[in-house]
Amino acid sequence: MGRCYPHLNLEERRKIGKWREARMPIPEIADRLDRAPSTIYRELT
């Protein structure tokens, strides 16, 4: 089986929302949260 990523918690989701409003790029958000960019993209869709 593939690697399993834990879901983002509420605090991380709030940070993502704030950073996306500020137009921060997804790769930078992923770095700040120590997550894969695909995890962030998955949460946004």
Image: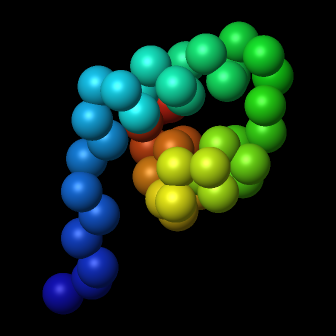
Residue 37 pos. (x, y %): 59, 56
Residue 42 pos. (x, y %): 44, 43
* Residue 16 seen: yes
The answer to which image quadrant residue 29 occupies is: top right
Residue 17 pos. (x, y %): 55, 18
Of residue 43 and residue 6, the one placed in the foreground of this image is 6
Tell which residue pokes out farthest to the bottom in this image: 1
Q: Is residue 4 above or below residue 14?
A: below
* Residue 38 seen: no
Tell which residue pokes out farthest to the left in this image: 1
Q: Is residue 14 above or below residue 27?
A: above
Residue sitting at x 52%, y 49%: 33
Give the quarter of the figure containing the N terminus: bottom left
Residue sitting at x 61%, y 16%: 18
| Residue 37 placement, left or right of 14 | right
Residue sitting at x 27%, y 83%: 2
| Residue 15 placement, left or right of 22 | left
